[in-house]
């Protein structure tokens, strides 16, 4: 039990965070969405802070590029995301991770770094002020050589960024981040 608290404390301390509170509902379903860098996220996801919204939009664009195994699009989305993260207080180290994804030599390296990026951003969005919609936290137990990997999505439908069309539907929804209203 102490180990879990220590891991949770480390994740919160090293991830980007926000001061707002958020209700998180546990679930066990499936999800995702397809966007281009800086394109609008489905109208159902609206965050109070404009920069946090920009981070979310950039993250979804990156995730969707990885789902489609679009290496160059993933590079561009990661570079855009890096800029948004660098301007968010507390997200400087996460911006470095986004930069690593932008500079990666292949999609396998991008997907590997996507795991730590997702961990940090899941922590950010759990504390973000969601005005409307639901952000789904999804998990693939087979990602990262069986260590598993999480990601965020705007839809329940699973579209796996770690495997793309090799195992598109591998995963499940593990949490839902919703408006506190």
Image: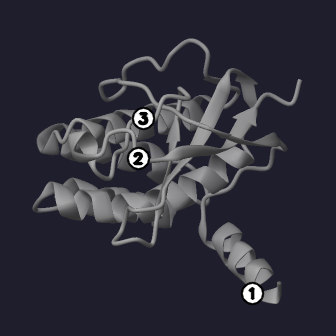
Position in image of residue 120 (x %, y %): 55, 60
Callout count = 3
Position in image of residue 37 (x %, y %): 31, 29
Position in image of residue 104 (x %, y %): 17, 61
Is residue 34 visible in the rendered image? The answer is yes
Crowding at dot 2, Cα within 10 Å, few <14 / some 14-19 / many 20+, comes out as many
- The residue wearing badge 2 is 170
If you read the primary sequence from the N terminus, does the residue marked by circle 3 or circle 2 appear first? 3
CA gap, disc 2 and disc 1: 28 Å
Q: Residue at x 56, y 49 (%)?
A: 88
Depth-wise, is mark 3 or mark 2 nearer the camera?
Answer: 2
Q: Residue at x 36, y 68 (%)?
A: 144
Which SS class for mark 3?
Answer: helix
Q: Residue at x 47, y 67 (%)?
A: 93
| Mark 1 in CB contact with mark 3 (< 8 angstroms) | no
Which SS class for mark 1?
Answer: helix
């Amino acid at each position: 039990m102490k180990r879990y608290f220590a891991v949770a404390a480390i994740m919160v301390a090293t991830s980007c965070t926000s001061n707002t509170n958020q209700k998180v509902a546990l679930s066990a379903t499936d999800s995702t969405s397809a966007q281009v860098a800086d394109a609008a996220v489905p109208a159902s996801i609206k965050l109070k802070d404009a920069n946090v919204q920009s981070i979310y939009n950039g993250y979804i664009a990156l995730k969707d590029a990885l789902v489609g195994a679009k290496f160059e699009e993933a590079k561009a989305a990661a570079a855009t995301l890096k800029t948004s993260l660098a301007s968010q207080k507390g997200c400087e180290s996460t911006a470095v991770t986004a930069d690593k994804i932008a500079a990666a030599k292949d999609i396998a390296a991008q997907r590997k770094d996507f795991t730590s990026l997702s961990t940090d951003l899941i922590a950010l969005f759990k504390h973000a002020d969601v005005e409307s919609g639901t952000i789904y936290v999804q998990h693939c137990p087979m990602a990262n050589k069986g260590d598993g990997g999480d990601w965020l999505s705007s839809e329940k439908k699973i579209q796996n960024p770690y495997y793309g069309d090799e195992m598109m539907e591998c995963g499940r929804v593990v949490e839902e981040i919703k408006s506190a209203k």
